[in-house]
Image (tube, rainbow, N blue to C red):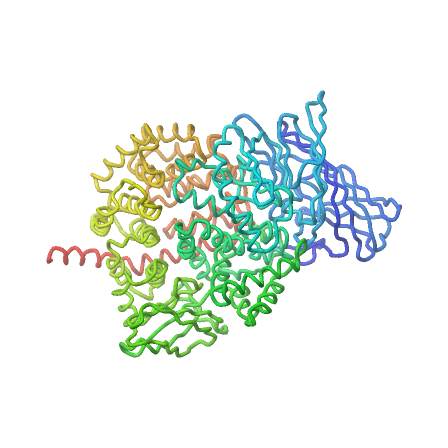
Amino acid sequence: MSVSPNLIDGRLPPAVVPKRYDVTLSVQPDQGRFSGSVAIQLHVREAVRRVTLHALELEILEATVESGGVHYTVAVSADAGSETITLALNREIAAGPAMVGLTFSGRLNQQMKGLYEARSGNERYAFTQFEATDARRAFPCFDEPAMKAAFKITAVGPDHLVVLSNMDVEAESMDVAARRKTVTFVETPPMSTYLVALAVAKLECRETLIDGTRVAVYATPGQLALTGFAHEVMRACLPGLNAYFDLRYPLAKLDLVGVPDFAMGAMENWGAIFFRENRLLLDPAQASANTLRGVANVITHEVVHQWFGNLVTMDWWEDLWLNESFATWLACKIVDDWHPEWQSWVEFARDKQVPLGVDALASTRPISSKVRTAAEAEEMFDALTYEKGASVLRMLEQFLGEDVLRRGIREYIKAHQFGNAPAADLWTALEVASGQPVPAIARDWFARPGFPVVTVSAAGSDFGTLTVGQSRFHADPDARPDADAPWAIPLTLAFEDDQGIRQHRVLLTDARATVALPADGKVRWVYANAGEQGFYRTRYDQGLRGALAVSSARLSPEERFGLLDNTWALAQKGELPIDEFLDLVVRFRGDDTRIVVEGLAGWLGTLGDRLVNDSERALFAGFVEDFYRPLVDSLGWDARPREGDEPKLARAAVLWTLGGAARPAALLHDMTERLERYWADPASLDPTLATAVLRLCARVGGKERYDRYLERYHAAATPEDRDRYLVAFGDFAAPGLTPAILALILSEAIRGQDIWKPLRGLLSNPATQGETWAFIKASWPALRRKGGSVGAQRIIGGTKALWRAEWLDEVERFFSDPANRVASAERTLTQSLEFLRLGLVFRREQHARLSAWLRGRKQARRAG
């Protein structure tokens, strides 16, 4: 990796810093262009003859520098590698105030970054997406989070379009002859460049006053009826967050804007949050339980950022987790307070699967990692920054106490508002609030890669005294043991004795320790990660494993899921035979715990798609059908009055797994009839079941059904409905149909933001993955252009499903070629290749045991 001489360890020279921007942007969406000017008030800390700032894909038309009444001669040079321009001056600027003026022009790109073009029907609009490092694509600036400044923004655009920015409109004027309008906004508080927002689009809104703040939800024409639920979420989360921080949201207004083309789920621009439409707009009568929860969580996550990220900002991208981990964790807390029946913390425990999987790889990284380039900054937006960081915060909260953690967070936010702060300042605040060695604990979890596996053993049947050990968990069975110091693990053990189910807390700081439980009578079982609130895996000796297996019904939902998930992880790396995992699965026959049912859908799906061969297909189908029969009998396929969401979600997971793995003829016939009724009357099918029905019917459908899906996709009335068909396109397996779907992906019918959705489905679909991989190789330049860097990253991530040795080699060669390389997906590629290698090892080591288990089960049933 080359680093530009204009930068110091990836950052601008600190001698010159901005204090205020006066930005004017003239946007012409119909022509795909923009132009503008920026006047930047600077503070020069020490005398300089060069001023370096960021600019990318801009034509600099004029540059001026003035200080103390002196106007300097300026020569402008650009460095594409560092995405900077340097203003070389004819003489030195003394320390003190200065002013830089620049005029420029650029094109609205279609990569969904910077100031870019978005389309809705035949209309062309302009929106911004500046995080992490793309404000520099819209105007020259000091594009680093620590270089906060005030922004005075003026925008010129077509008179028929709405113009929005972070702050309220201060003045607006019309040029009737040119059919253009000029909108000037109130000056912002000091903030980072990545939070600047601008929208120039045809938008409608509903506005209301919530806890003293004007909240408006914007959508493109025809979608205003889908904004009501967002207002409901805001009425819950904004007052909740004002109270949590004991510091009110500081701006007069907060806009939530649905954007037709948006690479990410949402962006927390201060005062003007932008959303992908499916994360903001929905019809509650037709929305699934998953979508209602997902939208609530995303909205709340972005509102949390108005404090954690916007009001107080990390110094540099290595501490991005200060934004994202906190927003993920606190959003879960706020949503759980609002809708406790949604069981948000139960879902939170399930969602640890993804970061645990990534963090067990040799190619993982610490949550807080070195960042020196724009591509490395973009790579930081991953499961480690979001879910692992949030999980560690959850673990820390349980150790310190909810009130103590909140008190420390309040002090941190108040002390650093409108400024920047490193992670060390937060740890100090929490240490002061708690009296605990928080910085030492935090270093283990945020500054080093990986996580521990906690091993638990007992002498015989006496579980009251335990030997507890820890070591780093590696997914690779051949990985060498680490010589690193042990983690400081806030360990909470759940156990059952004569008093019932109780908990015992220990801070485990040694590689091995003895723990005596404060038991009353015999200890029946021990679960070493109570409520699955710790970010670690657990491994038990045979006696403890057996006790947990027979007592699984006594565990909490999170623990039942965790018991299966940890056993699966140990089987994947070969520490336990796959038959031991399957024997445990059988014990959960009839268990309707929703996250258990959803977990089993993934684990059994992997076995069915990746390990079971054609000669064993009938045996596996018989096992799956028998396993799910009690759930089918108890849940049925129709929602019941007032049953709540948990049965609905469990039913959808059962349908998908049973239909996909076993394909009972009667079930497929029933679902085909339900699909026809759904098309005639959407209210005839529970919305939470709709995606499973559509995907299952796609798996067994041909061209006629595909044509009808395509017709319904074009006519979709809500973003969720459109997404249902996008995902289902990836499930068609009929011979000869894949080329039509692949051609659709590159057509105008599918937005650039969405191309990865059907492609990842097709990559994991055994019937289509070979043809899809060939298409990706042949069409990579077009896919990159259309999907942008985020889409490319997600497509590369999808290649981890290509479990063939020859494909492994091809994926590595193809994406390592400089012509195909995506700089912001380097780590994604490395991890995908590692997942692929591990998958091939898993199949090689466990397939024979799986086959023997299936045959043995059939023989045992015959004998019985």
Which residue of the protein is positioned furthest toward the left in this rendering?
863
Q: Is residue 62 visible?
A: yes
Picture coordinates of residue 524 (x, y %)?
A: 28, 71
Picture residue at 82% right of the left edge, 51% below the top: 97
Q: Quadrant of the C terminus?
A: bottom left
> Does residue 243 lie above or below 453 as drawn?
above
Picture coordinates of residue 303 (x, y %)?
A: 56, 48
Q: Is residue 111 visible?
A: no
Picture residue at 64% right of the left edge, 52% below the top: 311
Which residue of the protein is positioned furthest toward the right in this rendering?
69
Picture coordinates of residue 44 (x, y %)?
A: 80, 54
> Does residue 660 lie above or below 436 as drawn?
above
Q: Nearer the viewer, residue 430 or 443?
A: 430
Left or right of 203 on screen, residue 594: left
Q: Quadrant of the N terminus?
A: bottom right
Q: Nearer the viewer, residue 834 or 647?
A: 647
Left or right of 783 on screen, residue 520: left
Which residue of the protein is positioned furthest toward the top in this rendering?
177
Number of labels in the image equals 0
Picture coordinates of residue 376 (x, y %)?
A: 58, 53
> Does residue 272 lie above or below 243 as drawn?
above
